[in-house]
Amino acid sequence: MSDLVLAEVSGHTGIITLNRPSALNSLTLDMVRTMTGALLDWRDQSDIHCVLVRSSSEKAYCAGGDIRFFYQKGKATATEGAALIEDFFTEEYALNHLIHHYPKPYIALMDGVVMGGGMGIAQAGPAARIRVVTERTKMAMPEVGIGLFPDVGGGHFLSHANGQLGTYLGVTGDMIAASDALYAGLADVFVPAAELPALQAIVIASSPGGLREAIARFAAPFASQADPSNSRLAGVGEAIERHFSGNSIAELMASLSEDASDFAGKTLEMMRKRSPLMMCVTLSQLRRAATMSMGDCLRMERTMVRRCFEYGEVIEGVRALAIDKDHSPKWHPPTLAEVTPVMVERFFESAWPAYAHPLRTLK
């Protein structure tokens, strides 16, 4: 067990506490393994009725994977470095699949920063998920800004977000608040942060059959504090549908360029800072994932992340953001015009035959 993830049982509730506040709960391989072990143990215990995942920090639920680890191991020439990266993504995606198909209610208290890998351990499947946001929630899938793509099942849950909101969030990496998350279909209820201890007490005291209703009743008085119909995304919802329905980044950006609104201008500015290649890869990922099962989506993403480290765009992106902190990544290629279909397609060519894929057993 890792002290960065605390697993305990209270009543009939399994409680997982992410406990790496100094790194905003960025996931390590040991953290992934501890979470997986606890969830597997509780899955088959009849006296455990639900799982609640929370943070020990007010700042973050989980800011994603440990990108410094990605950089260090990605730069390493030693076999161990490559092996640890392979293990991390294989086991993280297996955890995402486990959560998506969890047979018991899975309550994610998405208080504070929720990005990347944090979304992967919050966006359970429809049968399990109860996703709670607060006034401190800052949600994003910002991977295109570090030369990656929205992984951890992002292809699945973004492509199933309302309308083209998932496309917008995936290719821009924009950060949203609680009401936006509710509007997009990436959260279920709003509860003020100060009320989370009371909510947890309700979860622990509730019977398995009445849990969802109990949470909904508790959250109902606070609904007006995060009205999705008044969210920032709702205000530009029509523009997002119009500009982000295309099947190429060039088409999306051309559409935005014809719009004189502040939204279009700010969105173009944001996209011009992202990796041109990875925006194209992300759009292709989201269009493919829309008709895939979660298992197939994760298998595709496992291939994609392997190609990302082979190509090296992610190493440069993390360098610019977290190592040298110059915020001036040298993307390759540097312009959208230089991205070719062959470059994009390479990310979807499996690195393994089907029988040897590291996630071949996912159903």
Image (cartoon, rainbow, N blue to C red):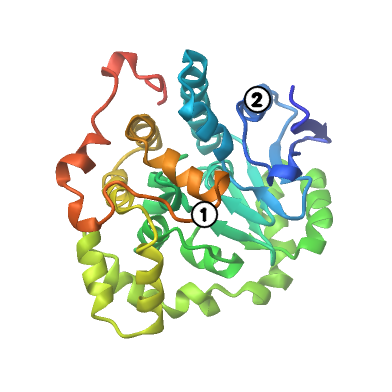
Residue 30: give its label: 2
Q: Position of residue 357 (x, y in %)?
A: 35, 19
Question: Quadrant location of the C terminus?
Answer: top left
Image coordinates for residue 197, horizontal then vertical, percent: 83, 54
Q: Quadrant of the N terminus?
A: top right
Q: Is residue 188 visible?
A: no
**Taking 218 as reference, is 332 left or right?**
left
**What percent of the width, then of the height, locates residue 218?**
75, 62
| 87 in relation to 304, above or below | above
The CA span between labels 2 and 1 is 30 Å
Location of residue 193 by image quarter: bottom right
247 versus 220 height, above or below: above
Please tell me whether mark 2 or mark 1 is closer to you in this view: 1
The amino acid pointed to by label 2 is Asp
Q: In terms of secondary structure, where does tag 2 sit?
A: helix
Is residue 90 positioned above or below 21 on the image? Answer: above
Type of amino acid at the residue the image marks with label 1:
Asp
Q: Earlier in the sequence, mark 2 or mark 1?
A: 2
Between 70 and 190, the residue placed more toward the observer is 70
Q: Nearer the viewer, residue 174 or 200?
A: 174
Tell me the quarter of the picture where residue 302 sits: top left
Name the residue: 34% across, 49% down.
Answer: 331
Image coordinates of residue 206 in percent, x first then y, are 78, 47
Q: Label 2 neighbourhood size at 10 Å, few (<14), some (14-19), many (20+)?
A: some
Q: Which residue is mark 1?
A: 326
